[in-house]
Image (cartoon, rainbow, N blue to C red):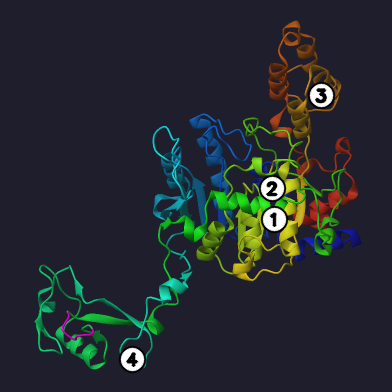
Amino acid sequence: MSESRSKIQNSINHSPNLLIKGNNLLALHSLKNNPRIYGKVKLIYIDPPYNTGNDSFQYNDRFNHSTWLTFMKNRLTIAKEFLRDDGVIFIQCDDNEQAYLKVLCDEVFGRENFVATICWEKKYSPANDSKWLSDNHDFILIYARDKEIWRPNLLPRTKEMNTRYTNPDNDPRGDWKAGGFSVKSYTAKYDYPITTPSGKIVYPPSGSCWQTSMDNYEKMLQDNRIWFGKNKDSKPQIKQFLSEVQQGVVSKTFWKYDEVGHNQIAKQEIKALFLSSLRESETNEAIQHKSKSGSKDSSGLPRLLTKSRNDEVVSSISLENDKNVAQKPIELFATPKPEALLKRIIEISTNEGDLVMDFFAGSGTTLAVAHKMNRRWVGIEQMDYIESITKVRLEKVIAGEQGGISKAVGWNGGGSFVYTELMPLNRIYKERILHAPSEVELESLYQDLATKAFIDYRTDIKEVLKDSDFSSLSLEDKKKILHSILDSNMDYVPLSDMEDSTYEIDSEIIELNKAFYDMEENDE
């Protein structure tokens, strides 16, 4: 193995965390060939575009219904393959597509692997200007890779739970609380009279019975596990000792905002992170070292090539101009998720060292929380704000930022991640077309499109550009046509073509890809 290859391989192997810029479907198909990730993920959490026409992630959130379902099915089908046998996926959605998404997930993951639907109270006050009802909740669908294998972790007991336990009779076993001794499922042999210490005879409520036999009751009475109240004449109750209860509690399916946060808290968390300067970057040797693992383009990003071509039309996802990110970072995310919400999800579904994936990474909340909780992570995001928001946020986490859940988990900083991107090809021209502010700017692209871009084989771009009908179109219509004739199969450079001289890919990037995909030396 060459010295360059060895250094790159060492950097990749020693950073458990990976952030990728690029189309998430293509990135997932590429990651199938990475043995450190494929089939090793314990938790996938995604918060995809909701198909509402009000998208906080700047995707085209005005999909028609069938297009949105196809968009989701393609991604969920490949995502399932990344889960361990004991893995689980949490998918956030709202009322608009929840029912349809549930049916789709039944098909992809199997109805028998449906675990539950969480209802998260995302707002703490009603929207009084709502036309119909105030939408105060989101849904989170949970599916296991194999429900017979996956089991959720218990949630830690809270101080509030423990304050319900007292010791009014100074029992040497410590604090306890009284629980009911009767049950509604009637069994005749459990229906018997009980005499209280005061001499009063009591019976179970009508239609009910005691929860155990008379013999067991006598044993519990001798063991001082039955409570008749301070006056010793009440119906019996069982003493439930704090020392004997399980050290955690099963999660409910309704998550209140005062337990796991709400949208407004999430906005405050993002604002606090980027208030001083969105573009500032802390010095961190681990990140700088990892950044040197591969060659970079002019933006300083290591490049990965896509493992295979993919024929999905990705033009339904649009990009927005990123020029105002530094001035208005918060407007990019209208409904971010609070760190406490992700903490709850990660707590019940993973343990330290497990691998967490989010391929709609957005502002990076999932990745930040996973990092603070000592989980490994993989994040994918195709929007330009990955450089100015997601990456910068994770750098701040490594530097020890104290927002969100940091104090709750004792976070003081540390760790590293590899930041890279799929090597764009036609994607570059699509973005330049989209961002062209005028006819003059658009026309300046024509030569590059005709000579460098990959055009759909059914189209002659020179004929299109000469056509008088095309010339008479509006700027936006011209953009749509130029966008449509670019071959979406060539949005990114395929790995199989990396040594094609047409792309002029330097040797370090080639070495990076061979190391990342664990290609054997004789494959070179």
- Amino acid under label 3? Leu
Q: Position of residue 256 (x, y in %)?
A: 44, 56
When the figure is inspected, residue 172 is found, relative to residue 109, above or below; the finding is below
Residue 99, picture quadrant = top left
Quadrant for the N terminus, please.
bottom right
- Alpha carbons under labels 3 and 4: distance apart: 83 Å
Mark 3–mark 1 contact, CB under 8 Å?
Answer: no
Over which residues does the magenta segment extend? 230-234
Circle 1 is placed at which residue position? Answer: 34
Between marks 2 and 4 in the image, the one whose residue lies nearer the viewer: 4
When the figure is inspected, residue 71 is found, relative to residue 32, above or below; the finding is above
Q: Is residue 409 left or right of residue 496?
A: left
- Alpha carbons under labels 1 and 4: distance apart: 58 Å
Q: Position of residue 86 (x, y in %)?
A: 51, 63
- Alpha carbons under labels 2 and 4: distance apart: 62 Å
Residue 188, picture quadrant = bottom left
Between marks 3 and 2 in the image, the one whose residue lies nearer the viewer: 3
- Amino acid under label 2? Ser
- Amino acid under label 4? Asp
Circle 2 is placed at which residue position? Answer: 30
Residue 157 in view (yes/no): no
Assess whether residue 57 is covered by the magenta stretch.
no
